[in-house]
Image: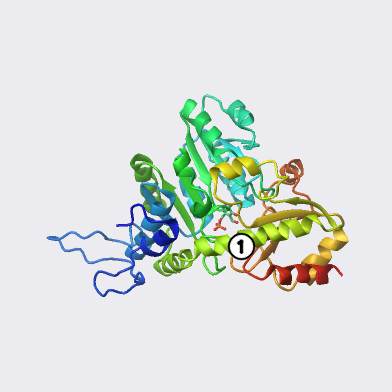
Amino acid sequence: MLKGKGFNTRLLHAAADRDPFTGAVSTPIYQVSTFHQDPDKPGDFDYSRSGNPTRKALEDLIAQLEGGDRGFAFASGMAATSSVLMLFKPGDHLVVSEDLYGGTFRALTTVFDRWGLEISFVDSSDPEAVEKAINPSTKALFIETPSNPLLKISDLRELVKIAKRHNLITIVDNTFLTPYLCRPLELGVDIVIHSATKFLNGHSDVLAGLVVAKDPELAEKIGFLQNALGGVLGPQDSWLLIRGLKTLGIRLDRQSTNALTMANWLQTQSWVEKVYYPGLETHPGRKVLSEIATGYGAVVSFKVKETEILDKILRNLTLPAVAVSLGAVESILTHPITMSHAAMAPAQRDKLGISYNLLRLSVGLEETNDLIEDFLKAIN
Ligand SMILES: Cc1ncc(COP(=O)(O)O)c(C=O)c1O
């Protein structure tokens, strides 16, 4: 019924939008752990770890939006990422974007390496560097783009070509762009991961992770891991996420416009050393991103010239929450070195340029005039 319909229409109607029993226009919350099993009429559900109707509505929705075979909902983005990493076995080698979420870096370098996964971190905005890092044990590319927090752009089309040449699985963390702006599976990627805590839910009130597999064979394996490891999303949070998703398109349109305004304004400020936003004409990844996505997202990073200014911003801002996280209706300012990337080894942070004077602003739905005024007041 929704074939050929636009993205915003699918956001509203691709999850169960009419309950078959009551006509309710919102997916009911099946707050239940187990299901009566009639030996003569086996049902679709038996135990909520293996499957729950509210969670399934969300999983079907994200599969539709990303254009994959099946979706899977997890208790957090990290539960999603670590379940996907369990596809591999000790001795397997992965090539991973070097400038990625600190928690993913931590899981790879302190948990999965102990368990025998070999990892090479590379600048995935440089396809040659990615191909050079591949060895006979390499099984997958794990890419985060735009990278976090420096917003480098990886050309997924080139990376997919490399992966196919070497028979590798391509995994993309699509948290920053969401399927509204970029659909990696349509570019040949095999698995998409989200911290749905961010733009997909959008309201700073749910922690969740989503995974979509492009083909049935991988989907089967991920479904097995989801059930075997059990890091599933509960029915209440699944429902909240379905509700948040309904406005993803209009939120991101407005937040991206606001982000461009803020990036342009930051560039004019004498106390700002450098602005990182892929929508800026000067950003080296702008052209590639414009070819693989329909927008530049709502995250802007910037470096300030003096620590004193940084302290004033962190202490005196009143509108953006100074917090870990991003992608919400309200603006969120993060100090990566002490927050989102505190878990990254200092040597790695130094190598990447994640310095003390770097800030990451997830731009929300406030009026940008008010945000600008708030920054000016904070530093003065
Ligand atoms: C890009 C990215 N991936 C994964 C995660 C982990 O998600 P969660 O915090 O929902 O576990 C985050 C969290 O900030 C993130 O920014």
Read off the residue under disc 1. Answer: 255
Q: Is residue 270 left or right of residue 116?
A: right
Q: Which quadrant would the C terminus be assigned to in this image?
A: bottom right
Whether residue 69 appears in this view of the structure is yes
The quarter of the picture showing ligand 1: bottom right
Tell me residue 301's x, y (percent). Answer: 71, 54
Residue at 63% across / 46% down in the picture?
147
Q: Is residue 307 left or right of residue 53?
A: right
Q: Is residue 224 left or right of residue 332?
A: left
Tell me residue 268's x, y (percent). Answer: 81, 57
Asked if the residue at label 1 sits under 8 Å from ligand 1, the reply is no
Q: Residues within 10 Å of mark 1 (few under 14, many from 20)?
A: many
Q: Is residue 317 left or right of residue 120?
A: right
Tell me residue 11's x, y (percent). Answer: 42, 61
Where on the picture, by quarter, is residue 308? bottom right
Whether residue 338 appears in this view of the structure is no
Under tag 1, what secondary structure?
Answer: helix
Instruction: Work out which residue is located at the far left of the displayed protein and give it.
Output: 40
Where on the picture, by quarter, is residue 234? bottom left
Residue at 64% across / 30% down in the picture?
129
Q: Please say which color scheme the image uses.
A: rainbow
Q: Which quadrant would the N terminus be assigned to in this image?
A: bottom left
Tally the numbered discs: 1
Tell me residue 69's x, y (percent). Answer: 36, 47
Residue at 70% across / 63% down in the picture?
333
Residue at 49% across / 66% down in the picture?
247
Where on the picture, by quarter, is residue 127? top right
Q: Is residue 326 above or below residue 282?
A: below
Instruction: Work out which residue is located at the far top of the displayed protein and give it.
Output: 136
At label 1, the amino acid type is: Gln
